[in-house]
Image: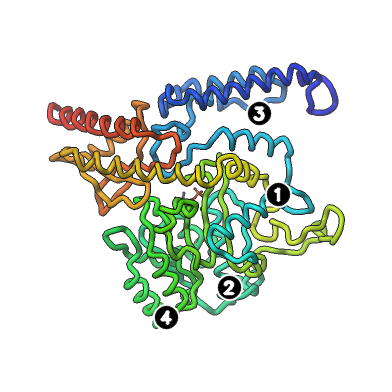
């Protein structure tokens, strides 16, 4: 098919078309029949060995390469499209997003800049996000890989807002300020990493304790700010979390906004897990205060069910955002007409120059489903989490370890000895059974079985199967340890 000709296009488009349709059919079969598969299975050693082969100098047919994908790659993915997947925070994806991704790849647009409608699609999503979060029309937004990158951008803009653009040339050494930021002990580790990468230093992130609902303790926050000022530090930013990765807690964003305003701090929200809940009238009540943020990081690839990757940063003050990243270069000269028009370009708002058309799969997802439908889906995941918590409460052998505020449930199997070890063994046993896929975390020092219901395919059936498997494996593991 690709054996002759001077370009990489096929010599025979008809057979390519047939092969393409087979590949599409295989993925539609995969998604439509996913419930019949195990959530996850470890790959056999001889499969792993295939991926140690050296860089090929000669060709393999597309058909054979596709067969190798079907045999050696597809069955051994982590399984987050499966309804039984509840580990970490993963989205389930959708066929709409998959098809849009194919169209975007076919177009092969580079969204770094220039005058093209694909950038207007991204700008339309930016406007949708402005409206969703009550930001002004002058706010800026940008697609990035994920919230790790979006949070980094938020903190870098906050740094520019505090020190000015001189920090870009002179670095922090010349700034004569020791910057400190604040977040809660339950914040995602990427916030600390952003402080490291930004040169502010991971140790200059103050991790404020949480209350019994796992929300940032605002009295402790105020005290920490006062203490740092007295010690000669310059507080510059506070990061609230809208849906913590551990338990799905939402910080008191209104309270944080008030403190940030009083103390003249940048207010950034890590909304990776929960910010998109704004499209649901029920869930948005829990997110009050998010509209007051200076910047918001969020992920369409989690609760939004858009295929990986699709993170997003929204910044209230576009000028400060642009001042943090834009740089002149001869070969990126702007014009008022022709292809080099349309300034500012997306590359002026983040570290990436070449960028894929991530906006298209989000645009398709929003167009095809509409926000009402997506809101219902999100609400259903919260209802399933409540149902799971009820089932835990009804089971004398299980204990709920944290209140459920969104769609994440942490619980454990109760036993007399080595309870942490037993629960971590239960999680491994469930994962290896292929029935469901929870993960673990620690809640107040106790090892928890953690189920994060982010997948639109998850149903009550899957919750029942998780509960049954937890109890069954719990009994089995504790009996085995008594016998041995
Ligand atoms: C997932 C997550 C992140 C990291 O986002 P990525 O998209 O994985 O980079 C940050 N914060 C929270 C609360 C998250 O759930």
Graded by Cα atoms within 10 Å as few (under 14), some (14 to 19) or many (20 or more), the crowding at tag 4 reads few
Report which residue position mark 2 lands on: 161
- Res 101 quadrant in image: top right
> Quick check: marks 3 and 1 in contact, CB under 8 Å?
no
Q: Is residue 202 left or right of residue 407?
A: right
Question: Residue at left 84%, top 23%?
Answer: 5
Residue 464 placement (x, y as % from top left): 29, 32
Q: CA distance from mark 4 to mark 1?
A: 41 Å
Residue at 34 percent of width and 26 percent of height: 433
Name above or below for residue 116 compared with residue 292: above
**Residue 440 against residue 68 in the figure, above or below:** below
Q: Secondary structure at mark 1?
A: loop
Residue 354 marker:
1
> Image quadrant for the N terminus?
top right
Q: Residues within 10 Å of mark 3 (few under 14, many from 20)?
A: few
Of callouts 3 and 2, the N-terminal one: 3
The part of the image, by quadrant, that contains residue 174 is: bottom right
Q: Position of residue 202 (x, y in %)?
A: 46, 63
Q: Position of residue 444 (x, y in %)?
A: 26, 54
Q: CA distance from mark 3 to mark 2?
A: 47 Å
- Mark 1: is the Cβ under 8 angstroms from ligand 1? no
Dot in front, 4 or 2: 2
- Mark earlier in primary sequence (4, 3): 3
Secondary structure category for the residue under label 3: loop
Colour basis: rainbow
Q: Are marks 4 and 1 in contact (CB under 8 Å)?
A: no
User: Mark 2: few, some, or many residues within 10 Å (few <14, many ≥20)?
Assistant: many
Mark 4 or 3: the one toward you: 4
Task: Judge depth for marks 3 and 1 and give the one in front.
Answer: 1
Per the model, the C-alpha gap separating discs 3 and 1 is: 25 Å
Horizontal relation, residue 241 to residue 143: left or right: left
What residue sits right under mark 3 in the picture?
Answer: 55
């Amino acid at each position: 098919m690709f054996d002759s000709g001077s370009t990489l296009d096929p010599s025979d488009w008809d057979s390519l078309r047939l092969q393409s349709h087979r590949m599409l059919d295989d993925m539609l079969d995969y998604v439509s029949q996913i419930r019949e598969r195990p959530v996850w299975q470890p790959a056999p050693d001889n499969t792993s060995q295939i991926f140690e082969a050296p860089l090929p100098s000669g060709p393999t047919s597309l058909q054979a390469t596709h067969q190798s994908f079907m045999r050696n790659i597809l069955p051994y993915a982590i399984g987050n499209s499966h309804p039984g997947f509840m580990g970490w925070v993963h989205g389930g994806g959708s066929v709409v997003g998959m098809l849009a991704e194919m169209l975007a790849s076919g177009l092969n647009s580079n969204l770094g800049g220039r005058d093209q409608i694909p950038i207007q699609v991204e700008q339309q999503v930016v406007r949708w996000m402005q409206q969703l979060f009550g930001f002004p029309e002058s706010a800026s937004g940008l697609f990035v890989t994920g919230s790790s990158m979006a949070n980094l951008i938020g903190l870098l803009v906050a740094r520019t807002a505090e020190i000015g653009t001189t920090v870009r040339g002179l670095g922090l050494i010349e700034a004569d300020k020791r910057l400190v930021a604040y977040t809660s002990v339950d914040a995602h580790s990427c916030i600390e990493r952003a402080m490291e990468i930004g040169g502010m230093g991971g140790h200059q992130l103050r991790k404020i304790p949480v209350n019994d609902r796992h929300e940032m303790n605002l009295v402790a926050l105020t005290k920490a700010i006062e203490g740092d000022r007295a010690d000669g530090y310059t507080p510059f930013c506070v990061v609230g979390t809208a849906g913590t990765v551990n338990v799905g807690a939402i910080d008191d964003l209104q309270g944080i906004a008030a403190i940030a305003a009083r103390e003249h701090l940048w207010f950034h929200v890590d909304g990776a897990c929960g910010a998109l809940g704004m499209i649901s009238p029920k869930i948005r009540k829990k997110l009050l205060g998010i509209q007051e943020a200076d910047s918001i990081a969020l992920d369409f690839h989690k609760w939004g069910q858009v295929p990986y990757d699709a993170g997003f940063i929204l910044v209230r003050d576009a000028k400060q955002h642009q001042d943090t990243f834009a740089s002149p270069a001869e070969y990126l000269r702007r014009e008022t007409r022709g292809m080099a028009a349309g300034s500012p370009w997306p590359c002026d708002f983040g570290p990436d120059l070449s960028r894929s058309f991530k906006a298209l799969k989000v645009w398709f997802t929003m167009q095809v489903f509409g926000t009402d439908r997506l809101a219902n889906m999100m609400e259903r995941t919260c209802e399933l989490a409540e149902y799971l918590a009820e089932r835990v409460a009804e089971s004398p052998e299980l204990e709920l370890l944290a209140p459920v505020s969104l769609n994440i449930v942490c619980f454990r199997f109760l036993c007399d000895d080595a309870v942490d070890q037993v629960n971590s063994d239960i999680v491994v046993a469930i994962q290896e059974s292929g029935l469901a896929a929870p993960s673990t975390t620690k809640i107040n020092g106790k090892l928890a079985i953690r189920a994060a219901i982010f997948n639109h395919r998850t149903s009550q059936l899957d919750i029942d199967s998780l509960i049954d498997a937890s109890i069954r494996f719990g009994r089995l593991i504790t009996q085995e340890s008594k016998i041995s």
